[in-house]
Amino acid sequence: MRPDENFAMDWQTDERGAKQMATIAKAVKNAGTLYLATDPDREGEAISWHVRAALEEKNLLRGKNVQRVTFNEITKSAVQTAMANPRELDQPLIDAYMARRALDYLVGFTLSPVLWRKLPGSRSAGRVQSVALRLICEREAEIEVFKSREYWSITGSFATPRNAAFSARLTHLEGRKLDQFDLDNAEKAHAARDLVAKTAFAVRSVERKKAKRNPPAPFTTSTLQQEASRKIGMSAQSTMRAAQQLYEGVDLGGETVGLITYMRTDGVTMASEAITAIRAMIGDSYGARYLPEKPRVYTSKAKNAQEAHEAIRPTDVSRTPESMARHLSGEQMRLYELVWKRAVASQMQSAELDQVVVDLTDSTSRTVLRANGSIIAFEGFLKLYTEGRDDTKTDDDEGRVLPAMNEGESVSTRNVEADQHFTQPPPRFSEASLVKRMEEIGIGRPSTYARSSACCVTVITFDSMRDASFPKTAAVS
């Protein structure tokens, strides 16, 4: 690259590419039309441009018709539609690729020598991977300086007049709302525990409300990698490898058929015909109650989302995971099931929950304990799919059913406990949480998430880095 010449670049074909180009060149000699059918993204557009440029240098395209075709799924109908509607190369997309490559070189050529000096034997630094590494190092620095703080909670076990048991947590003590660190030692906690234990309580209020939980959007590249990590333990790279295989197709009775749409995307929309087919399947398989009146429409929340492609979905919803199991490997099957369920669930009815909040007070209303509970009144999309979480801690109140209680009735105290806790440092990044953070701050693209998140895999301490402007702990790929 020559920055002083408007970032002009010199291109050279590597050995593997040269073999492919030789095959293409041989085929082009006896053809009237060259169809460029590379991936439907920025890199795919650039590859088509490179192929055309290389053939033009050899004077092999004189008198030839060059067309660009794209499709988001490798199915017969999609390929036929693409071939019937060719277009020219997208120059703005090629220019975007050029700008990205220029940034890659500028960052790489600047950072790589520093990396080689500080970490002998390391490879080159990347524009996205370097930022991912910084995120990891900054998180590690936060962990190292974190100072844990002690706090206590008071939980009472109670019984209704009908002898139904439930628990409640102390929220107000002697007329003052408790903050997290108000009970910060055993002496204060035990005093509060003893006060609650000898106090008579009655139900001051019972608040009931209905809540809805909407299904998540169908998968993008990043959400697929996050969910595959959380739910089936697949790394980002393994996820993309299996997704590529599902996209390229499997043998179904002598015909190779792509089972999912293009897997490098930040779009959350689905084709209208796919939504229609999914809604028909929901109505037939689950009943009208599980089908919203209108199709659901989703928009991306990612900062730099281009949404040029559909979300990741099954190419044919009638190919259920069960029917595809004998055609797929274990990884392929688990990932296909995830994609299929997420896509179908995204068009299902919302889940309905009954939430209950009960406040218990003493006679002066100066000491208050609160009990929370919720039950699923209608499972909706939860019948098929539940989204995973990065935080493995569960909410104690979620799914807990409280017994029937009426305002004004007394409850009996069975036991009161004081529990000691300590604040925890921020967790180290998992592949899923690193991908999520990168997407939140607009770093990287769907094609780079897997390579960048691999930085998380190994954490090594380098004492020699103490004199540099780095934390002593760094993650490297």
Image (cartoon, rainbow, N blue to C red):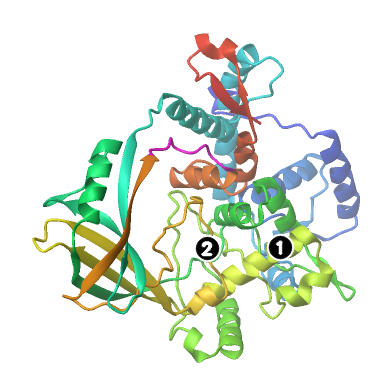
Q: Position of residue 173 (x, y in %)?
A: 17, 50
Q: Which residue is mark 1?
A: 334
| In this view, 277 is above or below 264 | below
| In this view, 324 is above or below 223 | below
**What are the residue bounds of the magenta stretch?**
422-430
Helix, strand or loop for the magenta stretch, by majority: loop
Q: Residue 35: name its quadrant.
A: bottom right
Q: Which residue is mark 2?
A: 387
Of 429 and 372, nearer the camera is 372
Q: Give the alpha-carbon distance from disc 1 to disc 2, as whole Å.
A: 15 Å
Left-right relation of 1 to 324: left
Q: Residues within 10 Å of mark 1 (few under 14, many from 20)?
A: some
Label 1 is placed on what type of residue? Arg
**Residue drawn at 53 percent across, 67 percent down:** 386
Of 214 and 83, nearer the camera is 214
Left-right relation of 331 to 452: right
The disc, 1 or 2, on the residue closer to the chain's N-terminal end is: 1
Of 184 and 328, nearer the camera is 184
**Residue drawn at 37 percent across, 42 percent down:** 420
Badge 2 marks a residue whose secondary structure is loop
Q: Residue 188: name its quadrant.
A: top left
Q: Is residue 46 visible?
A: no
Label 2 is placed on what type of residue? Glu
Q: Position of residue 156 (x, y in %)?
A: 31, 58
The residue sitting at the left extreme is: 364
Identify the disc placed on residue 288.
none
Badge 1 marks a residue whose secondary structure is helix
| In this view, 387 is above or below 60 | below
